Image (spheres, rainbow, N blue to C red):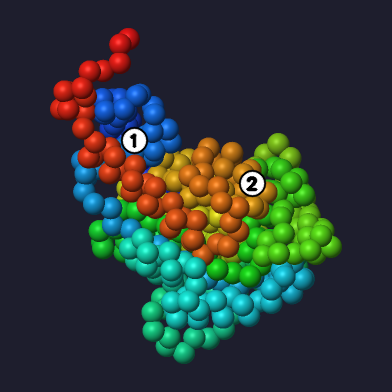
Amino acid sequence: MNTASRLLLSATASTIDSPSEQWFARARAHLDMLTKPRGSLGMLEDIAAQMVSIRQESFAEPLQKAAYVFAADHGITVEGVSAYPSEVTYQMVLNFLAQGAAINVLARLHHVALNIVDVGVNADFDAVNGLLSCKVRKGTRNMLREAAMTDAELAQAIEVGLKFAASAKTQGKNLLAVGEMGIGNTTAASAITAVLTNQPVALVTGKGTGLDPKGQARKRQIIEDVVQKHFAAVDGNAMPDPLEILRCVGGLEIAAMTGLILGAARDGIAVVVDGFISTAAAAIAFAVEPRVRGYLFAGHQSEEPGHRVLFEYIGLKPILSLNMRLGEGTGAVLAMPIIESAVCLYNEMATFASASISEAKP
């Protein structure tokens, strides 16, 4: 079971080391010496210490930022789980390439190199400039009727993400945002979340791109049926294999993001996850190799109820909370200046000693 994907990820996971505890302790000590009351920068201090533990000797070098948006379609959309038709995936990819989407605006503003990747859109692109074509197949299968992917397809999609992580390292990128585009992918993310965390489908399923209450109820029932079909025989006290979860109820873009996250951890690169769908990929990566968590930042908490459940599962605290539910990597890119600010404060603030300022009395 999962032979190709398991071998691929086992080889990657075995090379992942946790960020340095020694550098983390050193960073904490340095933060306490800066000209401020201890802990007064709050979460910014946590972010700075984590970045130092990841980057170690390179902590003072400028951040080189990139965002990867993986696009793919989902066979489950034929069951009416989305407010938008599936062709919107293709149309939005064209909008990305025309520089007209929210992620384009934010990436330009914050000087983030943007990469748009077709890993499974159910359409043909005729040599469109700027698109990175890595199509595994034209969308997943309908997971209500059969597994979303074969093992070979899953392995191929994961490998796409691994290769982009390696490419990012070659390009000198050291802070990556991961996002997606795929009509129907909140259904996949909800199914992943329910099975991975052993939580009720109703608790982790929201309205996606804007379903009305009737549509949301239908979506929940379909996810219940999907989970029952693929995982009814699983012991409730035992988590199914994360790769089998991804293969049966995931998406090609979710698999690619999983690969990118694992590859980035392998290469010592920090990753900012975006919304519910990219956090589902992060949760799969974490289930495969828990040391991944030390390289992850949660860009924001979306309105999708399953997002909070995934944060609790991984052990992440969101940087922003803006009631967003757009995807595309927008929340992750928005959080990058916060991370950059934390690093700059760490590197550029004076210490009590260097500024000849008296410290607080014990």
Q: Please identify the quarter of the rendering in which residue 292 is found.
A: top left
Residue 146 vs residue 254, the one in the foreground: 254
For the point 67% across and 65% down, the residue is 209
Three-letter residue code for mark 2: Leu
Tell me how many marks there are: 2
Residue that label 1 marks = 49
Three-letter residue code for mark 1: Ala
Please identify the quadrant where the N terminus is shown. Answer: bottom right
Residue 111 pos. (x, y %): 33, 63
Mark 2 secondary-structure assignment: helix
Q: Is residue 107 above or below residue 318?
A: below
For the point 84% across and 62% down, the residue is 214
Residue 312 pos. (x, y %): 59, 39
For the point 75% across and 58% down, the residue is 223
Q: From where the camera sits, is residue 242 visible?
A: no
Discs 1/2, front:
1
Q: From where the camera sits, is residue 127 visible?
A: yes
Q: Is residue 215 above or below residue 280?
A: below
For the point 71% across and 64% down, the residue is 210
Residue that label 2 marks = 196
Residue 168 vs residue 97, the one in the foreground: 97
Spatial separation of the CA atoms under disc 1 and disc 2: 29 Å
